[in-house]
């Protein structure tokens, strides 16, 4: 977008300067025009699908360590939680397990993550270890929703 030069003190406003102002305003209007590509749709439990400008959506990225060089056995579970704030409705939350540390074992690769509770300010869940061994597991969390 072009920038309009500031007039000098006492400078008469001529046609060329007014043209630059109008052109800059028009360029700004094109950049801010409402198009479907600039909106995000978020399905909420209590209010159905909500559509907001993408710049007005709230996205939280989080991380939680679940197991740090711990010995696990098949069927062992570990609980986790993560706090966030400023959501009007319950957000859509996604959790992905990641290997951390140096233990790149089958026990670390063979896990299942289940979300047990999602609210407007907290997510809780369980990681189930399906193999015996040493596990270093962290969780990446992404919550997308409508801010308060």
Image (cartoon, rainbow, N blue to C red):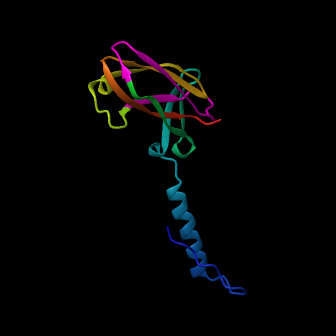
Residue that lies at the very extreme toward the right in this rendered image: 10
Is residue 105 positioned above or below 30 on the image? above
Q: Position of residue 37 (x, y in %)?
A: 44, 44
Q: Position of residue 147 (x, y in %)?
A: 61, 36
Is residue 6 positioned above or below 111 on the image? below
Magenta segment: does it hold 88?
yes
Looking at the picture, tell me which residue is in the foreground, 125 or 24: 125
Looking at the picture, tell me which residue is in the foreground, 61 or 56: 61
Looking at the picture, tell me which residue is in the foreground, 125 or 136: 136
Quadrant, the C terminus: top right
Q: What is the quadrant of residue 66 in the picture?
A: top left
Residue that lies at the very extreme toward the top in this rendered image: 75
Q: What is the quadrant of residue 97 in the picture?
A: top left
Q: Position of residue 8 (x, y in %)?
A: 67, 85
- The magenta span reads 71-97
Residue 131 placement, left or right of 5: left
Is residue 122 positioned above or below 27 on the image? above
Q: How many marks?
A: 0
Q: Position of residue 77 (x, y in %)?
A: 42, 16
Magenta segment: does it hold 27?
no
């Amino acid at each position: 977008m072009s920038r309009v030069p500031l007039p000098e003190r006492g400078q008469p406003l001529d046609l060329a300067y007014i043209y630059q102002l109008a052109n800059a305003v028009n360029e700004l209007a094109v950049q801010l025009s409402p198009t479907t590509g600039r909106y995000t749709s978020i399905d909420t439990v209590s209010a159905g699908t909500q559509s907001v400008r993408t710049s007005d959506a709230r996205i939280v990225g989080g991380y939680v360590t679940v197991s740090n060089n711990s010995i696990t056995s098949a069927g062992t579970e570990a609980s986790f939680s993560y706090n966030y704030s400023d959501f009007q409705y319950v957000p859509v939350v996604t959790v992905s397990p990641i290997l951390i540390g140096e233990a790149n074992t089958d026990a670390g690769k063979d896990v299942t993550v289940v979300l047990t509770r999602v609210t407007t300010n907290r997510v809780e869940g369980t990681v189930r270890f399906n193999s015996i061994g040493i596990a270093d597991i962290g969780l990446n969390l992404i919550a997308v929703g409508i801010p308060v």
